[in-house]
Structure formats: C-alpha cells, structure tokens
Amino acid sequence: MKLSLRIWRQKDRNTPGRFVSYEVDGVTPDMSFLEMLDVLNEDLTTRGEEPVAFEHDCREGICGSCGFLIDGVPHGPRRHTTVCQLHMRFFKGGDSLTLEPWRARAFPVVRDLVVDRSAFDRIIQAGGYISAPTGSAPDANAILVPKEAADTAFDAAACIGCGACVASCPNAAAMLFTAAKVAHLNSLPQGQPERDERTLNMVAAMGREVFGTCSNHGECEAVCPKGIPLEFIAALNRDVIRAAFRRRREPLHVIGAAQHPAHEDVCESNSAQKESST
Amino acid sequence: MSESLRNDGRVWVPKKKGDTRRPNDIPESERDYYLERRYPSFGNLVPRDVASRAAKEVCDEGRGVGPGGHGVYLDFADAIARLGLDNVREKYGNLFEIYERITGDDAYRVPMRIYPAPHYTMGGLWVDYHLMSTIPGLFVAGEANFSDQGANRLGASALMQGLSDGYFIIPATVPDYVATAKPEKVDTSHAAFREAEEDVRRRTDTLLKVDGRRTVDSFHRELGRLMWDNCGMARSDASLRRALAKIPELREEFHRNVRVLGTGEELNQALEKAGRVADFLELAELMCLDALHRAESCGGHFRVESQTAEGEARRDDANFCYGAAWEWAGQGQPPALHKEPLAFEYVHLAQRSYK
C-alpha cells in the first residue's frame, strides 16, 4: 500500500524545523511502523535526500528508544503499543499521517523525530544506589519479598522511559515516569534503606528539569505503552509526605517539588543549563 | 519469542507436506510433535541448538507452516487445559501480548508460529580472570566478554552473566585495579588521543566521501543473508569457504559503493550504521574463519560433516577441546589463533543424549 506522510524535519537543535511531505510506497501489512520508515529512508537515500532520523533499538517494545507523535498521539493509535510494535495492518492504503517529535521544553529536538531525553537520565541518576552485598552468593530467600510487592515493583519497572507521558501531558509533566521509577525500588524490601532519600532526591531532580507540574489530567496513563497506572503518582505523593515526616538530619527544604518546583530549584536549573550550553 | 515458552508449549508441524489447513482443523493424529517423538525424555525442553536444528529440518522437508513455510507451531492448548487459562496468562501473558501485537493472532486460541533465528554471536571479547581485556584498565562485564559462553548460548544467559560478573567479580577486580594502578595524568593533548581522534575522523570522512549507489541497509541485508545461508544453524566446509570468498568482495564493494549522506558534524544515523556494518563485515569474516577451523560440531556450531548416524552433533574432543581466542593482527592480516584448553574436573565430557 501507499501512504502520505508529513514528517517534521529539523537539522539540529538550533535550526528551525518544518513539515515535509513524502509518499511511501510498497508498504505491507506485516511491517512495523519503523520498518515502514526504513523503506522511506532507503528510498530517500537512493534519491539523494537525507534519511529521516528516528530512534530505535530493540524493536520489541522493551528498550524505550523509539517514540514520536502520529497524528498528535504518542506512539500512535494502538493502546499499550510502542511505534516499533505498531504494525501497518492497522493503517490502510492512502492514509495520510503526520509524524512529529515529542513536544516538551525538557526534551529539545536533536534532529527530525529524535529528542534529547537526558532529563530522564538525570532523574534516574538522582535515585542513587541500593545497598546490596556483593562478593559472594547471597543465601536464597535471605530477603523475603511478598508476592504483591514483587508484582508492584515489576509493574513499575515496566516503564521503559520512552517519554510518551511527557509528550501527552498538557503540562509536559514527568510525574508518571518519576513515580514509576520511584515505586520500582520503593516497593521492594531491598529498596527500603534508601527509600526516603531516593524519593526526595528524584523528585528534586524532576523539579530541576523544565518539566511542568502534574494536574492529574491522566493523558499520560492513556498513552503509556506499558500501561503504567496513575496510582503510582498517588503513591509517589504519599512517599514524598512520608519522607518529609521521617526526615531527621536536615531541616525541611524543597519538599513541594513534586507539585510545584521551588523557586531556587528553577534558578538552579536555569544556571545549570547555561553551564551546559557553553 | 522467548524460549521460556517451550516450558509449557508443545512444538509440532503437520505430518503431511504442504498442509494448508488451519492448525485447529488438523486432527491430533495428523500432527507430528517432532521434539517429543525424537527426544522422548526431554521432549520440548531440549537445548536450543537441538530444537533449532530440528525446526529447520522439518521446514526444509516442506512441512513448515505459515506464509513462506518458515514456521513451526508452538501450541498451548494442552497447557491451558492442564493449568487453566489464568495460570498460563499469569506465566506468559506479556509474551502472548507481544506475539499478538506482531502477528494479530491470539495465541491462547491458535498456536504460535515460531522459527529459530540467531541473536547472539556466542562469543565476545577476550578477558582474563579479572574480566580485564587485553587493554589494561578496560574491563568487559556481562555478555560482551567471552568468559562464560560456550558452544551454546544458554537461556537467560544475559541475565546470568550480568549478575555473576556484577555481583561476584567486578566488585573485587575493578577496585583492585583502581587501587593499584598508577595511571599517569593524561589529557587530550596526549599523542594516543590525537591518533585515535585522527583515526575516527579519517574513517568518518572516508565513509562520507564514497558517495556510491547502495544504501548501508542493503549491504547489511546482503551480509545477513550470506551469514544465514552459509554460517547459520548448519554449516559445512564448502558453505564457509563460500562465505569467506564473498565477504571480502562485499566489503570491498561496501567501501567503494556505499552511500552515506549528510556530514559528520550533526547526528547522522546513516553514518553510525555504516560504521557498524563496516564492523559487522570484519566480525562476520572472523566468525566464518572460526567456524571453518573448528571441524567438529559442538553445541550451536553444527558442521554437517561431523554428525552421528542419527544426525546429532558429534564433537571431536581429541582435536578441539579448547576455546578459540582470535587476536587481531592488524588491518589486512589474518587473525592469530590462541587456544585456551578446557579442563573438566567434576563433569566429564560425554556425548549428549536427550532421547
């Protein structure tokens, strides 16, 4: 079948982008959406035009590399499906589709459909480590993990960090992502020693990036390819309050970052950006 | 699909060649559960090299299913009847979902169609017992090294090796290195840095300047096909020699006729891919060379010349009881073979049997 595509082309972060229209032919129903773009790119290369940049790696829906908007919807029309697992049998010949990168200030465009999601990496880094003995094999079942805790942690760990939640949020908030990443280790016995520190540090790191604030809109849950539920956001809010009350060592500071980044955090983020751009 | 599905799924093909009936319309008596038939004691749980070759054989016989005939059924009907739908969903739900997404089929109702495909090289960078490579200070952990890999890549070995290296070895050896090494202070004005930078720039420029007629992907596909046909689930002296004759030709054409557009100044995915395919062209040649020199069958390496009367892999322990470490000897030079003898203290070498 043959499709018409309007694709956002942008050379780099500092060059203005624009939509360019392409026709792609020879698309079969068994192709994934990315394979369809491979076909387009081969054709473009043959014609001497630079291929469309898009991120991809595993193409099994588990690495979190891919993702862009198809007609305004992150990862396209299928629920719980990344673009790499979205197959062309859900489209028909003659369809006209608009593809554009995630639109969020925290995710600057690198090129075409590729955005810089290192803000997510910095949130994860802020989570730090868990205390884990190494060096010799631990005794089996030395730490008992309740089934329910294991399941919750697994559900949270299903987050692949693709960024669809941010892209779909009218505030470009990163709450669902951060909530899932916090819940993963906070749900497990192994994650308890650093639980409060991890929660506060990750929420503060989120506040330092230029994400918006959560207004419980819920679009994130609707587009999440891994079906991460909003409950994790509620759990994160509980964990922040819990951590705030349990904190002993230092005076309370920046706790409201989960909902409203503190003024000094925003300033810090601005100065950090200036440093990185020079 | 994940191999864990073979824990409960039953593998079969129609007994008759070219049977185009839907799987659920084929009666029990006309199905060939070939793994259970050939390996009664292990059945569907035979190791992946055995299961892969058996699938290839039935498909080569013309009994493969699905479009193209490259498929065998993996059937959960019995597992669902025995364990209940909910239990099967609990165990494998995510995999069934992936399958549904790719094929549009509901594997709870119709059997999955599967076919073996290579997905690891079953090898990696040489490391010592500290997991340090031949470059001092460069440690290689997890599946990127060769240390725990044998003739078969075992199920979940990525996880296993990541955990064992990460828990037991690296926490001792890297701190030891850091504590004892006395690195000199280096910055980017160091001659080695400038040499490496120059080398990368030269390679980048070379790829960009070719401006040929073929895309990187077309070379990648051709190389993949060549390896699939000649260095795949079954290889022979002749097929490997054929590949070894063709790979240098393909590499020569790649460097003469590849088309990489754009520049090296901004994100250029075609350029990245071209660098990787250039590497694959080297690695593929090495894999064929290694497979050719090892004139025995062993695990995933099945040389058709070396099989038992029943078609199983036949090792030659007198001549090949070693791990092969190939040393890069420089551009255009044949790699040098280092043999690392294998010693077996507790479990002794024997002919495998899964019957």
Image (cartoon, coloured by chain):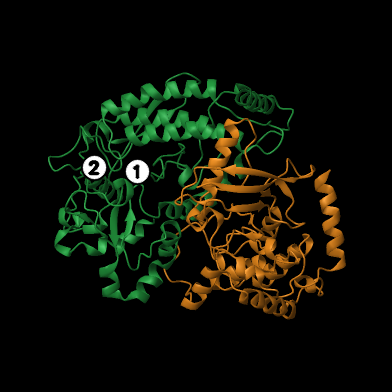
State which tag comes first along the sequence, 1 or 2: 2
Between disc 1 and disc 2, the foreground one is 2
Count residues near mark 1 (Cα–Cα under 10 Å), then give few for <14, some for 14-19, many for 20+: some
Q: Secondary structure at mark 1?
A: loop
Q: Position of residue A124 (x, y in %)?
A: 66, 60
Q: Residue at the location (27% across, 33% down)?
A: B320
Q: Give the amino acid at mark 2.
A: Asp
Count residues near mark 2 (Cα–Cα under 10 Å), then give few for <14, some for 14-19, many for 20+: few
Residue A200, quarter of the rendered image = bottom right
Quick one: which residue is furthest to the top in this view? B332
Q: Is residue A237 above or below residue B231?
A: below
Q: Give the amino acid at mark 1.
A: Gly
* Residue receiving disc 1: B150
Q: Is residue B137 visible?
A: no
Q: How many numbered badges does the structure rendering display?
A: 2
Q: Secondary structure at mark 2?
A: helix
Q: Judge left or right: residue A210 versus residue B348.
A: right
Residue B272, quarter of the rendered image = top right
> In this orientation, which residue lies closer to the viewer: A14 or B294?
A14
Q: Colour of chain A?
A: orange
Q: Colour of chain B?
A: green
> In this orientation, which residue lies closer to the viewer: B166 or A181?
A181
* Residue receiving disc 2: B60
> In this orientation, which residue lies closer to the viewer: B279 or A200?
B279
- The circle drawn on residue A112 is none
Q: Is residue A64 visible?
A: yes
Q: Judge left or right: residue A101 versus residue A57.
A: right
Q: Judge left or right: residue B12 versus residue A124.
A: left
- Label 1 marks a residue whose chain is B
Cα–Cα span, label 1 and label 2: 27 Å
